[in-house]
Image (cartoon, grey):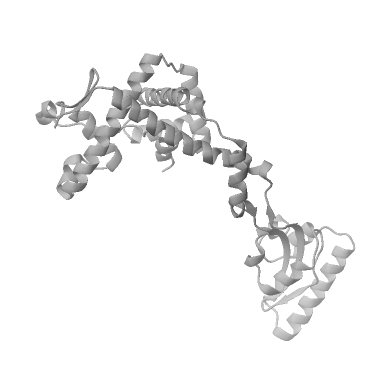
């Protein structure tokens, strides 16, 4: 279901909540306070809702299945909710604001990245029991959190050039582009012909086609007219292959060819092939200039994660939190 991707590619820190709605008979119990975070509270209702969102099942059912797993999930989820509260409190203190235009732009990126129309998005949200306004609010919250992380963490990160160079030199194998060849093939098959007479007729046809190619006729046009193999409608173009993907006989033939060359007829059990080498991309090591941004992102993300963990711990140490169970 394409719509489901919305909720995991869009949101940058947490997924949207699919809330658990208790029956009236247990509403009061579910709204009891389970944690205090500075001057705000977290209720059992919120905790159960987040647990169901993450686990995909009602917490009561989870508890019946595995008490130990349930308690661990509850502990981790409550810690996550506490950190969410602290983050939102910090956002308010810093006065971080996200405009409706920024929300619109983020949603447009989400739709574009997932190949969704506005109707697709709304239909996907409806299946998840969420209205469009609620979805916009969740996007807004996530954008605010990104601004906070940028302010508190990312703006302070410095990646040294020497670290990038050292990583490149130690991990060169990660930046090797394997060789590949781009081929077009005309396939002539013996269908409907006797073994003896058909073979001779097929060979004559192959020689005739090869002569026309040497005379300057277009390979693609002749492939469309005569080929009975893959890619015939595309002028015989069968795309790129690693040399290891080719059978030994063809691999040896290709090795002696240059881009633009056309092979002699290759006899196969089922017919005859004429191969054109369109391009030959040899194995190469990407230069550091080509991969510098990718290496930078490796260091950057690692540093963001480390600094964010330290920042949220510091924020929690300074806050008043009390867990009530």
Whether 279 is drawn above or below 310: the answer is: below
Which residue extends farthest left?
25
Residue 90's image quarter?
top left
Whether 189 is drawn above or below 182: the answer is: below
Q: How many marks?
A: 0
Residue 125's image quarter?
top left
Q: Residue at x 9, y 30 (%)?
A: 25
Q: Residue at x 81, y 61 (%)?
A: 258
* Picture quarter with the N terminus: top left
Q: Which is nearer the eye, 175 or 163? A: 163
Whether 93 is drawn above or below 278: the answer is: above
Q: Which is nearer the eye, 9 or 320? A: 320
* Picture quarter with the C terminus: top left
Question: Percent x, y for residue 203?
Answer: 79, 77
Question: Percent x, y for residue 192?
Answer: 67, 77
Question: Is residue 290 toward the left or the right of residue 8 in the image?
Answer: right
Residue 323's image quarter?
top left
Question: Is residue 126 toward the left or the right of residue 159 in the image?
Answer: left
Q: Which is nearer the eye, 227 or 303? A: 303
Question: Percent x, y for residue 163?
Answer: 58, 40
Question: Percent x, y for residue 207?
Answer: 83, 73
Q: Residue at x 47, y 29 (%)?
A: 118
Query: Would you say residue 115 is visible in this rendering?
Result: no
Query: Would you say residue 70 is visible in this rendering?
Result: yes
Question: Is residue 291 toward the left or the right of residue 92 in the image?
Answer: right
Q: Which is nearer the eye, 13 or 11? A: 13
Whether 282 is drawn above or below 303: the answer is: below
């Amino acid at each position: 279901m394409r719509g489901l991707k919305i909720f995991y590619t869009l949101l940058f820190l947490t997924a949207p909540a699919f809330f658990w709605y208790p029956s009236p008979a247990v509403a009061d119990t579910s709204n009891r306070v389970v944690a205090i975070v500075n001057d705000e509270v977290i209720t059992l209702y919120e905790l159960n809702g987040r647990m169901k969102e993450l686990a995909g099942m009602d917490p009561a059912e989870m508890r019946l299945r595995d008490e130990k797993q349930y308690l661990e999930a509850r502990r981790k989820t409550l810690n996550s909710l506490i950190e969410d509260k602290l983050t939102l409190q910090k956002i308010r203190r810093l006065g971080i604001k996200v405009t409706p235009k920024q929300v619109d732009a983020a949603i447009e990126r989400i739709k574009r990245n997932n190949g969704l129309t506005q109707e697709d998005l709304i239909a996907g949200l409806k299946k998840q029991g969420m209205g469009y306004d609620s979805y916009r609010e969740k996007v807004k919250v996530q954008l605010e959190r990104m601004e906070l992380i940028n302010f508190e963490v990312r703006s302070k990160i410095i990646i040294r050039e020497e670290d990038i160079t050292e990583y490149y030199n130690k991990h060169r194998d990660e930046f090797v582009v394997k060789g590949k060849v781009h081929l077009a093939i005309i396939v002539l098959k013996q269908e409907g012909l006797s073994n003896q007479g058909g073979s001779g007729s097929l060979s004559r046809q192959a020689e005739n086609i090869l002569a026309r190619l040497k005379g300057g006729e277009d390979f693609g046009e002749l492939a469309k007219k005569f080929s009975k193999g893959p890619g015939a409608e595309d002028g015989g173009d069968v795309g790129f292959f690693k040399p290891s993907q080719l059978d030994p006989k063809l691999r040896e033939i290709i090795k002696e060819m240059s881009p633009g060359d056309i092979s002699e007829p290759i006899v196969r059990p089922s017919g005859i092939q004429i191969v054109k080498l369109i391009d030959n991309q040899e194995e190469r090591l990407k230069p550091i200039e080509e991969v510098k941004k990718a290496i930078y992102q490796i260091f950057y993300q690692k540093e963001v994660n480390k600094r964010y963990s330290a920042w949220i711990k510091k924020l929690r140490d300074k806050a008043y939190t009390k867990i009530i169970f």
